[in-house]
Image: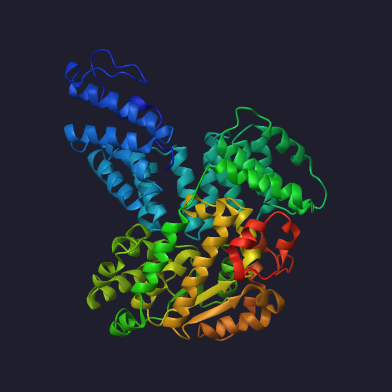
Amino acid sequence: MNNRLPPAWSKHLKVQTGPKPKFPQPNLPKVNSLSRAQADEALLQQAYQFQQVKRLGEAQDLCLQVLARTPNHPLALYILGTVCLGYDDEAALRYFARAAGEEPKNPYYHLGLASAYVKVSEYSPAIRHMQYALELQPDLIEALCALGDAYIDFDKPEMALPLYEKALKINRDHPKVRIGLARALTSVGRMVEAAAYLQEAIERRIKVPAAYNDLVQTQKFTEEPKELKAILGELGNPNLEPDGAENLHLAAGKVLNDLKRYKDAFDHFNKSKQASGRNFDIDQYRRWIDSLIATFTPEMLAAKADYGNPSEVPVFVVGMPRSGTTLTEQICASHPNVHGAGELMKLRRVANAIELRRSSAGNLHSAIASITKGLSRTLAEEHLSYLKERAPAALRVVDKMPHNFELIGLIGLLFPNAKIIHCRRDAIDNCVSCYVLKFGEGHSYNTDLKTLGLYYREYDRLMQHWNEVFPGLIFENQYETLVEDQEAQSRRLIDYLGLPWDDACLRFFDRDGSVNTPSRWQVRQPIYKSSVKRWKNYEGEIQPLIDALGDLAET
């Protein structure tokens, strides 16, 4: 649901003779009083306005009106792609592909298609379309930055930096360049340089709230920095947009937390959640977990025991966000025979394709019934090819998408010999660590303490079920055990993967490669214990969370 539309609107519409409708056009002339092309243009300009203010249903309806009259109108297809992006990425892929097919020399349509491929972790086609967009328009900053981002996500950060540097020469003040370059530097551990670019972005008034939030993540503060006063000053801006307020409150909270001013910090964390405006249907989620438990029974799994592929290459690191998944991946990926692939959407994409999704809660049996033995092997082989593309020689490839904990049943069908590492952490610590960070829209359970606690209970209930139906399959990796005795637990992890021990696993923080999660600062450091029982700093502020967790809260 990003606001993406090619600049220079008129370049992407057919040039018409006669007067054009004014933009915006609240009272559009009747269709029969205009040529069809003029009417299409008027509707699409209004659709664009709706898309910009996130009135997505109305934007979609107008685009569909245009397509009903002018099938395959490329701009209508493109706007529909932007509407779907982040909400229904498979639909976005289809719309962008059709737009690019209709107008193959339009770089923005290829860039839109590439962005949809990134959303579903299909980086090879994404990179191809970005590169083609740059062939069509070599100085297209959006494409340079998007390609840089894709290389970072594809674990090739060294290829991203030259792209940002080229973009910087074209336009030093473009927000995607400044923020993107800092992200690229951060992903390879060059924190000081990243901070310098972010500070310059702030001085030049480029995406100031996001720059401040990224800046304060690059270091730990032991005395009050001048940035805190500046951040609080920015919060006084009466024209501040909700996203900006969310970023600034998070930045202020992070600095105050470092300074051990915990009550003030949590006040800002609460305000950041209020600014986000998100909500979560916990009852629907509970029904989804009920359906998973009712569908993936021991009897069903026994009947499909010979499904899938016996490969031991896939490794899935699952759990709640902020439970140690990034740390665990980094330790494993420090082994010379293991590749850390980051958070992949591939498994979720398979689940969505067979309707194993939250919106289908209550009717998952038909989704599983659709998986024949032959289909399970085809899906597994396709998945293995996808992993091999990322690391052809690796004996193990780690996908650390935390929420694959919902799909362990599907993993069992496709890869009965896969290794599954479940990262678990003190429930209150885990939830507090989630709450104080900004997550994407798919994590809206994280905007309310009570809802977060109830969500955690559902996650715990599902994990209990998986351990019952897959006895002995899942390695339970307790965060507190790992930080208490890193070597012993790391050895257990590598042994579970079926690999010989390598001392490189003890120096995971020296490992090359990109880290693109909120843990990117921590995993550049040796293991530290300060996050254990961190929640006690906020004990007076988090009672709704503790109450919601119930017996899972160890106080």
**Is 375 positioned to the left or the right of 291 in the image?**
left
| Residue drawn at x 43%, y 67% as measured from the top left | 406
Image x and y of residue 28, in percent: 28, 19
Observer-nearest of 235 and 293 = 293
Q: Residue at x 79, y 44 (%)?
A: 225
146 to the left or right of 57: right
Of 490 and 167, nearer the camera is 490
Where is residue 275 drawn, in percent x and y?
58, 41
Quadrant (top left/top right/bottom left/bottom right) for the C terminus: bottom right
Q: Residue at x 47, y 38 (%)?
A: 141
> Which residue lies most toward the right here?
223
Q: Is residue 210 visible?
A: no
Rendering coords of residue 332 (x, y %): 56, 75
Q: Position of residue 328 (x, y in %)?
A: 58, 72
What residue is at 42 percent from the left and 43 percent from the top?
A: 1
- Front one among 99 and 530: 530
Picture quadrant of residue 139: top left
